[in-house]
Image (cartoon, coloured by chain):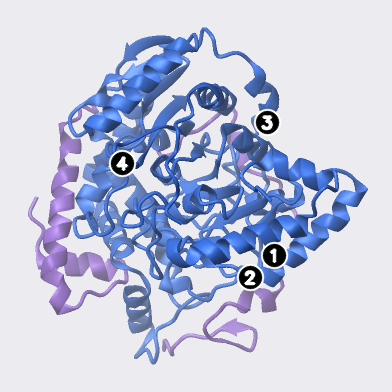
Chain colours: A purple, B blue
Amino acid sequence: MPITREEVLKIADLARLHFDEGELDAFTVQFQGIMDYIEQLKQVDVEGVEPTSHVSLAPDFEKHMFREDEVAASLPAETSLAGAPDAAAGHFRVPKVL
Amino acid sequence: MDIRDAYVVRDAVNAGEVSAREVAEAALRRIEEADGTLKAFLTVEPERVLARAGEIDRKVKDGPLPLAGVPVAVKDNLCTKGLRTTCASKILEDWRPPYDATAVARLEAAGAVVVGKTNCDEFAMGSSTENSAFQATRNPYDLDRIPGGSSGGSAVAVAAGMATLALGSETGGSVRQPASFCNITGLKPTYGRISRYGLVAYASSLDCVAPMGNSPRDIALLLSQVAGRDGHDSTSSPEPVPDYEAELRRPVKGMRLGIPKEFFGEGLDAEVRAAIEAGVKNAESLGCEIAEVSLPHTPYAIADYYIIAPAEASSNLARYDGVRYGYRVDAPRDLLDMYQRTRSTGFGAEVRRRIMIGTYALSSGYYDAYYGRAMKVRTLIKRDYDLAFEKVDALVSPVSPTPAFKIGEKSSDPLSMYLSDIYTVTANLAGVPGVSVPCGFTREGLPIGLQLLGRQFQEGALLRLAQSYLDAFAPQAPALRV
């Protein structure tokens, strides 16, 4: 399936990525090559096959996926903020939104 | 002080014959000597290492520890509290995690000493360790070649004697392949065997913490300390952790080994093929029975992996937005500009490429055709393994179709790099364990690894086979270049 520059730009926008004009053509060609290779999945007969989103490991595995909703210790706010590029007044600070 | 064997180190430290500090000093000296050339480590803080070793020296006075003073290298996508953890990415260049990964915490509780954080492909995306934002790691058997990846730094740390054991991670072969390129042993455990808590997420349904060492015996020792259920990771398995040391003592005679014919087709290097075929004969001479088996969906595995892994990555890596941690671009115009430019300049080319593939595959109108179909093909790949394991106890194959390639050889052609994972990715898609064990060298002196794949939670059987194999047939290694 041919992929256009416009589609690449649309996907980049969804992914919050930006491609410079100078790299866009080369990227589109490479992206097309990879997606063309992936097309071969269409040759596989998957009629009636259940999807595997996760390799579940035991018949009763789901019961281990959930725990009681109990209060437990968590990281102090100042520790959580310590790695932020811009923290102020106990919050993460970002450019003005409104 | 020889630090190549974990049992030798821990027994000596427990007996008080040598201090953990002396062991740590030996590891640091070797790093000082070799790593300027090899570039396996991104972060080494000697004072921290020695302080930690000093704590172990005090602790062993109260009783022996299973990994007393054993130097361990840790891949830089595993969180280490207060110690820089970059994922080899500019976007996390100065990040110091506020907590330890469970695997790291358990190793330290067992007496191990983390000597440093190792280089890898950015966010573990790659097969050569060239996709690091900081440096390209060199293969100690040929400095012009890659060490494999993405856990290349961890492999080189062990292979070159800078650490006794290492933690890497696997999503599609990232420990088995560098182990095979560096003449060491690497284990990809069953999905869920080791907690993923604190392993920076790439593709959550595939990611595993995976150990590397100079022998299967050493890896069994490490695994017995880090495996098992962890409340911080709901996908960690409640399956009891067996006594791996006891498992290693059981016989291999009579084990049935399958040769998956799809792993010996076009594209397999002649020298690698010859080494693996000789390896199969060797296994037969240990009393194993050999049978041909088929994994018919193998030809679709790379395409399947390159939908599923990027799809999960595109979601997991959404968290790097310049808000809560890591890098933020200077002087953003507004919030959207901050997101876009932070991510575009913070991520390298391969990470951006996979985010794009994943976003495309999950986008409206394409979801069923790509991700939906890929999940069904994954079922078929897993079923291939289930059927094979009805007939045999383990599978034997090459790890990689070629030995280590030259630095730069595949970096401009991402698809050719992806295809080099053909023999390893299916184990991740199916969730089964696999071991890479040294089995020979090419005429040029490059290591070749043999892969053993087993049923879920049969790490003990794989490590036993691998250890028996090495005890009888360990290849004679040429001298390291450093």
- Asked whether, in this view, residue B160 is left or right of residue B237, the answer is left
Q: Nearer the viewer, mark 3 or mark 4?
A: 4
Q: Which residue is mark 4?
A: B403
Report, in whole angstroms, how far the alpha carbon at label 1 lies from the one at label 4.
34 Å
Q: Earlier in the sequence, mark 1 or mark 3?
A: 1
Residue at the outermost right position: B62
Q: Amino acid at mark 1?
A: Val
Report, in whole angstroms, how far the alpha carbon at label 2 lies from the one at label 3.
33 Å
Q: Nearer the viewer, mark 1 or mark 3?
A: 1
Q: Earlier in the sequence, mark 2 or mark 3?
A: 2
Q: Amino acid at mark 3?
A: Val
Q: Quadrant of the C terminus of chain A?
A: bottom left
Q: Which residue is mark 1?
A: B49
Above or below: residue B28 compared with residue B262: below
Q: What chain does mark 2 sit on?
A: B
Q: Amino acid at mark 2?
A: Glu
Q: Earlier in the sequence, mark 2 or mark 4?
A: 2
